[in-house]
Image (cartoon, rainbow, N blue to C red):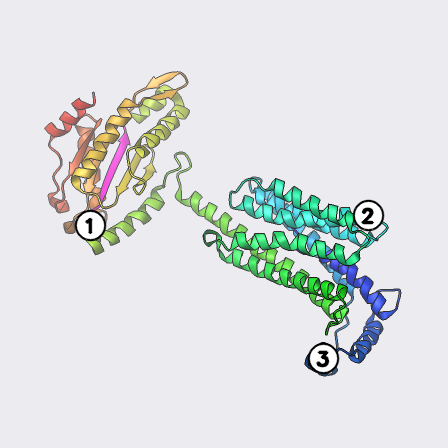
């Protein structure tokens, strides 16, 4: 992704300007900067800025301008861009499906390449100027495009291509006007930076990493703004209280700091999303993509606390796929896996979005239904049993009718404070269904655990008969 500014262009321009200011033909040295400082102190700026001039001269007498070697800063920017290319390239290689890292790596490479080309530009070299600036601008636009991919958004390539082509065309048109070229590229790179900041400041994307990236963008925009203001002032004949050396130092240091902070923010965003993926792997069953036992236990514990505070009941529906071993023997392990996935899809079509379906292990599943009464849980249980019967599994040109056994438990005030009380009720109800022929439901009423009664065998058998 590189340093998101016109860093290399600024470097080249300021080196050239400082040569002119110091009347030497080599890069500024400590002696050159001392002569520049002396000339700055003798400049009469009182016509436009009488008070500012006085304070600046007093400040320079106390704190002389530091000797900043612009070639050194330029090389630093290039090296930082190469380092960022290496970092994002490594991340994209380790995480092949992380497309944003690939785009950011390409942006870093383009930015570094554009920087290496810019020192060779001149008014007589249109191709070098247009290609160097175009590549650097494209690198900044790819930063914005990578953010879109990071947040799962498609498109954007047409805008990137159009904006880059426009800047290249303007570079060709104004290749003899140095100020116009610099201004075009200040604006050309500021636009994608501003768009990136707006994108990151969206409420749904405002993470710690996004805030850090925005801070880096703000610093970069400040550097662009100062440089653009100086170009406009110079072209209109307005005197400036600051020297080219001061503005150049500020702009280039802003470039370095902005790029590092911006990329660090993106790295934090990357760590956040990778951490979330790891957390999902720890909480999601890989076969059926529903919650696993670990996650379900956390949700159930929280729901117990909620019900104890509000007094509103919840229901647990514990269900097993009937004769799962026989299904495995008939269809093989792939067929057994397909039957579990099929069962999950059927169940998800019968429950609410707020309900939690989890795979506890093997062919055992559990549904947690918040704010659910006994009649509501009974209706859902019967609907699931019927839907599984009406939607057979199709596997390798075979049609297999599946069935399940289900035990239902309801939270009540009597069970408050008793660990696993509701789960134990549902488990005993499930055992009752299996004992009476499977393919049905049994219900544990809201009584104390020791007194919990199950559906009578006649009612359970009646349900079984309805599904045969």
Structural distance between the alpha carbons of marks 1 and 2: 75 Å
In primary-sequence order, the first of circles 3 and 2 is 3
In primary-sequence order, the first of circles 3 and 1 is 3
Q: Position of residue 248 (x, y in %)?
A: 74, 66
Disc 3 target residue: 53
In this rendering, the count of numbered labels is: 3
- Main SS, magenta region, reads strand
Disc 1 target residue: 312
Residue in view at x 73 percent, y 72 percent: 240
Structural distance between the alpha carbons of marks 3 and 1: 74 Å
Secondary structure under the numbered disc 2 in the rendered image: helix
Asked if residue 79 shows in the view, the reply is no
Secondary structure under the numbered disc 3 in the rendered image: helix
Nearest to the observer: residue 137 or residue 280:
137
Disc 2 target residue: 126
Tell which residue pokes out farthest to the top in this image.
Answer: 397
- Residue 255's quadrant in the figure? bottom right
Q: How many other residues sit within 10 Å of disc 3, few (<14), some (14-19) or many (≥20)?
A: many
Secondary structure under the numbered disc 1 in the rendered image: loop
Q: How many other residues sit within 10 Å of disc 1, few (<14), some (14-19) or many (≥20)?
A: some
Residue in view at x 48 percent, y 55 percent: 206
In primary-sequence order, the first of circles 1 and 2 is 2
The span picked out in magenta is 312-322
Nearest to the observer: residue 312 or residue 132:
132
Structural distance between the alpha carbons of marks 3 and 2: 40 Å
Q: Is there a contact, CB below 8 Å, between mark 3 and mark 1?
A: no
Residue in view at x 16 percent, y 38 percent: 375
Q: Position of residue 456 (x, y in %)?
A: 10, 32
């Amino acid at each position: 992704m590189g340093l998101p500014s016109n860093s290399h262009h600024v470097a080249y321009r300021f080196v050239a300007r400082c040569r002119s200011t110091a009347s030497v033909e080599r890069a500024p040295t400590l002696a050159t900067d001392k002569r520049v400082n002396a000339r700055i102190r003798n400049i009469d700026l009182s016509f436009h800025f009488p008070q500012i001039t006085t304070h600046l001269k007093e400040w320079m007498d106390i704190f002389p301008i530091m000797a900043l070697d612009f070639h050194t800063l330029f090389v630093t920017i290039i090296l930082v861009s190469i380092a960022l290319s290496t970092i994002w390239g490594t991340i994209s290689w380790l995480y092949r499906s992380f497309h944003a890292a690939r785009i950011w790596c390409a942006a870093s490479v383009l930015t570094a390449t554009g920087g290496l080309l810019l020192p060779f530009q001149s008014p007589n070299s249109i191709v070098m100027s247009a290609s160097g600036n175009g590549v650097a601008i494209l690198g900044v636009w790819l930063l914005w495009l990578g953010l879109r991919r990071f947040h799962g958004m498609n498109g954007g390539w047409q805008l990137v291509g159009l904006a880059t082509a426009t800047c290249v065309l303007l570079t060709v048109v104004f290749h003899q006007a140095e100020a116009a070229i610099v201004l075009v590229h200040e604006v050309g790179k500021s636009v994608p930076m501003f768009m990136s900041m707006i994108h990151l400041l969206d409420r749904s994307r405002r993470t710690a990493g996004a805030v850090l990236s925005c801070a880096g963008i703000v610093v970069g925009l400040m550097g662009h703004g100062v440089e653009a203001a100086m170009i406009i002032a110079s072209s209109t004949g307005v005197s400036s209280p600051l020297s080219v050396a001061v503005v150049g130092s500020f702009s280039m240091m802003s470039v370095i700091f902005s790029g590092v902070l911006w990329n660090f923010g993106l790295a934090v965003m990357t760590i956040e999303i990778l951490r979330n993926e790891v957390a999902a792997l720890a909480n999601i069953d890989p076969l059926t993509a529903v919650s696993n036992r670990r996650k379900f236990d956390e949700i159930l514990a929280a729901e117990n606390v909620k019900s104890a505070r509000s007094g509103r009941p919840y229901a647990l529906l514990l269900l097993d796929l009937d004769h799962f071993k026989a299904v495995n023997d008939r269809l093989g392990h792939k067929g057994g896996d397909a039957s579990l996935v099929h069962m999950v899809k059927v169940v998800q079509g019968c429950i609410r979005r707020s309900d939690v379906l989890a795979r506890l292990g093997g062919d055992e599943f559990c549904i947690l239904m918040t704010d659910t009464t006994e009649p509501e849980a009974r209706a859902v249980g019967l609907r699931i049993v019927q839907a599984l019967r009406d939607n057979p599994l199709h596997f390798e040109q075979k049609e297999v009718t599946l069935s399940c056994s289900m035990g239902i438990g309801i939270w009540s005030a009597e069970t408050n404070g008793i660990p696993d009380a509701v789960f134990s009720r549902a488990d005993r109800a499930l055992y009752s269904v299996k004992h009476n022929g499977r393919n049905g439901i049994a219900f544990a009423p809201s009584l104390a655990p020791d007194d919990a009664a199950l559906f009578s065998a006649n009612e359970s058998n009646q349900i079984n008969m309805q599904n045969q």
